[in-house]
Structures are given as structure tokens and as C-alpha cells.
């Protein structure tokens, strides 16, 4: 095995593949990256047995890959990444000295890394599921950005730590909830589909971090066990989360008694200003809504209180006072990513809906709490 390649290009590919690797794997081979050099390409593979990533490098004008000899080896991921990232000069050379010793060099110096024979790497099943659909890179980014924050961070219900993808006809409903709030994004598909799967928030975050630019779509393949994301000569495969995702349609209100709309930046800044006023470490805010004025209030017996009028607020409907988690509200407003935010109320202590008036594809639900009075 012997080849030369652009250092920065290889470093970026190693970063992508390493996202599948656990440093605490009981199997030594799975703490490494499997480098497989063929006549016309190089394959980099990383896995923790649940997540597997395979990235292929073909020679081109950007990576300046030149292959002299084929071969393969497994090298500890963290050491390999550190060497490649910190070496100077644009081009570096790799040469397999024997079955377990890798030489990495450039004009400045030489490193030798001990590795593992490639036949020690476990066999990975990269079979391709039959159900296939496409999303643009921006669509996938938006799905994750606008829903992932609502995922649960508790392992007691693993299915709630992921984002649910439910395809009905030509609509893809992407939902996340921790039972106290809900975020949902709707994406139009090119053709009718029918599936209901839940993908780990971490896996989706890793995929989004690995996307480069905006060109080319992401090809997605699913079945009832796993999902594959194929993009930029990289295949990202992960197992699905077990368990039935809640029927979120039941908690999305359909009828409302009052409506609030304001500048989203004003509301977000007002909430953020009171973030330090907490009760039992929870940031509670109270909205006192009337046609004349809308007040945002906070209070803590230990810290103090605040009372602010929301100057841009437009409110119609019954007078209403509602208390909720300010952090949940702020997360939802940021994820809506609009100049204005609309809040539709169904009543005291009943879930309320937040939307962006200019983007009906996304909605947020927040469950209120009992007032701090």
C-alpha cells in the first residue's frame, strides 16, 4: 500500500468517518479507521456496530490522489487524525511497511503508526434498503435544525431521543418531542411514500455536520431496521430507534380562543433578558395577554422579578394568562427562523402552537405549567 494525497482533503474525510467510532469499543479494530487502497480509489471505514460510515476517495484535481500500490490496514482513529491534521505541507505520503506498520511522511518529517491487520475488522452489512427517497442538503439541514432541539435527552424512552420520519403520500412529517414540547417540519416528497421510522438525533446531527455545500441531493434508503444516507461519495448507515413514536397529531390543537403575533426578535430578546430569574433552576415566564397590552413577567423569591410590555404585540381573543418554560419558548422561536412569530392559544394549561406566518411547513407546540403565583 502506497499513495500520496492532499492533506486537508484527507483530514476532512477522516473527520467524517471518525464520527462513527467509539473510543470505548471492546473490539480494538472498531476504535480504528479501516484504510483500504484499491487501484482506482481509497475507502475509509469507521463503525461502532450501530453506526457505520464509509467514505470513498477517487483521484481528482482537488485531492491530488496518486495510488502506487494497493493494500489495507486498520489504524487508531485519534492518532491518525491528529497526525494528518497537524502535519505541514499540502501533500502527504502513506506507505505500508509491513502488515501492521504504517509510514506517514512529507518533506518535513516521518511518523510511524502501529496498526492492526485489516482481516481483524468485523464484517459490516452495507446492504441497501429498497425504499428510497431524496432530500436536498438544505432540506435535511432544516429538518434537523428545526426539530432536534425538542428531542428528549433521557434514555428512559430511547425513541424520544430521535426524530420521527413519517411519510404519508407525498408528505414527510418530521417530528421530535420530549412530551413537554413538540417540533414538526413537513417536507414535500417527489413521489408517494409510506414508512414510519425514528432516527437518532445524534446520527442526524452527524450527517448534517458531514454535508458539504448545497449541490447534489442526499439519497436516503430505509427499511424497518436501518437507514442509509448517501452523499458526496460517503455512505452513512445507522440502526433505527426501537419503540413506537407517540401519535403527535393528538396533541396538535385544531381550535383556538386567542391569537398573538409579534416581532420574533423582540419576544426572543425579552425572554432571554430574564433567563437568570429562575425558580428551582427552571426559567418560567408568564404571558399576560389582553387586546390593550401584552406583558411578559418573571418572578423568583430568591432572585427578583421582571415585568416587560411587548411593544410589537398584536393580540385578539379572550384575555389570557399563561405560564410556560421560557427556554422551550426561546428554542421554538429560534427554530422557526422568521421575522414574526404567531402564537395560537387554546386555553389556560392547554398546549399552545407557535408558527412562522411566512412558513407553514413548521410548527411548535409548548405545554404550559401552573402559574408561579
Image: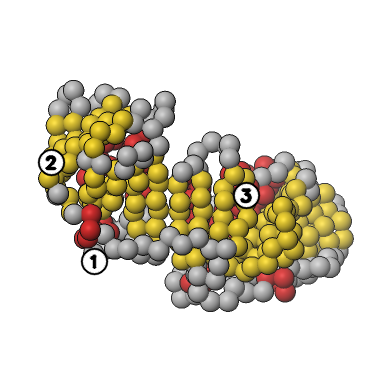
Q: Which mark is residue 97?
A: 2
Q: Residues within 10 Å of mark 2 (few under 14, many from 20)?
A: few
Question: Residue at position x 24%, y 45% from top?
Answer: 71
**Residue denoted by label 3:** 135
Q: Helix or strand or loop: what does disc 3 sit on?
A: strand
Question: Residue at position x 59%, y 44% from top?
Answer: 217
Is 247 in front, or is 92?
A: 92
Q: Residues within 10 Å of mark 3 (few under 14, many from 20)?
A: some
**Residue denoted by label 1:** 26
Discs 3, 1 touching: Cβ within 8 Å: no
Q: Is residue 31 visible?
A: yes
Image quarter where the N terminus lies is top left
Side of 200 relative to 250 (left or right): left
Measured from the top left, where is residue 21 in percent x and y? 33, 56
Q: Earlier in the sequence, mark 3 or mark 1?
A: 1
Structural distance between the alpha carbons of marks 2 and 3 = 43 Å
Is 134 in front, or is 338?
A: 134
Question: Residue at position x 23%, y 66% from top?
Answer: 26
Q: Nearer the viewer, mark 2 or mark 3?
A: 2
Amino acid at each position: 500500500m502506497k499513495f500520496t494525497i492532499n492533506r486537508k482533503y484527507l483530514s476532512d474525510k477522516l473527520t467524517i468517518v471518525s464520527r462513527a467510532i467509539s473510543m470505548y469499543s471492546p473490539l480494538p479494530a472498531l476504535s480504528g479507521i479501516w484504510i483500504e487502497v484499491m487501484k482506482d480509489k481509497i475507502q475509509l471505514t469507521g463503525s461502532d456496530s450501530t453506526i457505520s460510515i464509509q467514505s470513498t476517495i477517487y483521484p481528482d484535481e482537488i485531492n491530488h490522489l496518486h495510488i502506487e500500490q494497493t493494500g489495507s490496514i486498520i489504524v487508531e482513529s485519534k492518532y491518525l487524525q491528529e497526525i494528518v491534521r497537524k502535519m505541514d505541507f499540502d501533500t502527504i505520503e502513506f506507505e505500508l511497511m509491513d502488515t501492521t506498520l504504517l509510514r506517514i511522511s512529507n518533506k518535513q518529517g516521518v511518523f510511524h503508526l502501529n496498526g492492526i491487520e485489516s482481516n481483524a475488522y468485523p464484517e459490516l452489512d452495507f446492504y441497501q434498503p429498497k425504499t428510497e427517497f431524496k432530500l436536498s442538503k438544505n432540506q435535511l439541514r432544516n429538518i434537523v435544525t428545526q426539530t432536534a432541539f425538542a428531542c428528549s435527552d433521557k434514555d428512559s424512552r430511547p425513541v424520544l431521543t430521535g426524530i420521527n420520519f413519517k411519510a404519508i403520500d407525498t408528505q414527510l412529517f418530521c417530528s421530535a418531542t420530549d412530551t413537554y414540547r413538540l417540533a414538526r417540519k413537513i417536507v414535500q416528497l417527489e413521489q408517494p411514500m409510506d414508512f414510519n421510522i425514528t432516527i437518532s438525533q445524534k446520527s442526524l446531527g452527524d450527517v448534517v455536520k458531514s454535508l458539504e455545500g448545497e449541490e447534489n441531493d442526499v439519497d436516503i434508503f430505509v427499511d424497518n431496521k436501518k437507514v442509509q444516507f448517501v452523499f458526496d461519495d460517503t455512505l452513512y448507515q445507522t440502526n433505527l430507534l426501537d419503540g413506537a413514536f407517540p401519535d403527535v397529531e393528538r396533541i396538535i390543537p385544531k381550535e383556538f380562543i386567542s391569537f398573538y403575533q409579534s416581532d420574533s426578535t423582540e419576544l426572543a430578546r425579552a425572554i432571554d433578558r430574564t433567563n437568570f430569574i429562575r425558580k428551582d433552576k427552571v426559567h418560567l415566564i408568564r404571558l399576560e395577554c389582553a387586546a390593550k397590552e401584552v406583558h411578559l413577567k418573571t418572578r423568583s423569591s430568591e432572585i427578583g422579578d421582571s415585568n416587560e410590555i411587548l411593544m410589537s404585540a398584536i393580540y385578539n381573543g379572550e384575555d389570557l394568562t399563561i405560564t410556560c418554560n421560557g427556554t422551550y419558548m426561546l428554542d421554538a422561536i429560534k427554530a422557526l427562523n422568521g421575522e414574526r412569530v404567531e402564537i395560537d392559544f387554546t386555553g389556560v394549561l392547554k398546549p399552545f402552537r407557535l408558527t412562522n406566518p411566512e412558513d407553514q411547513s413548521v410548527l411548535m407546540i409548548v405545554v404550559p405549567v401552573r402559574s408561579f403565583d
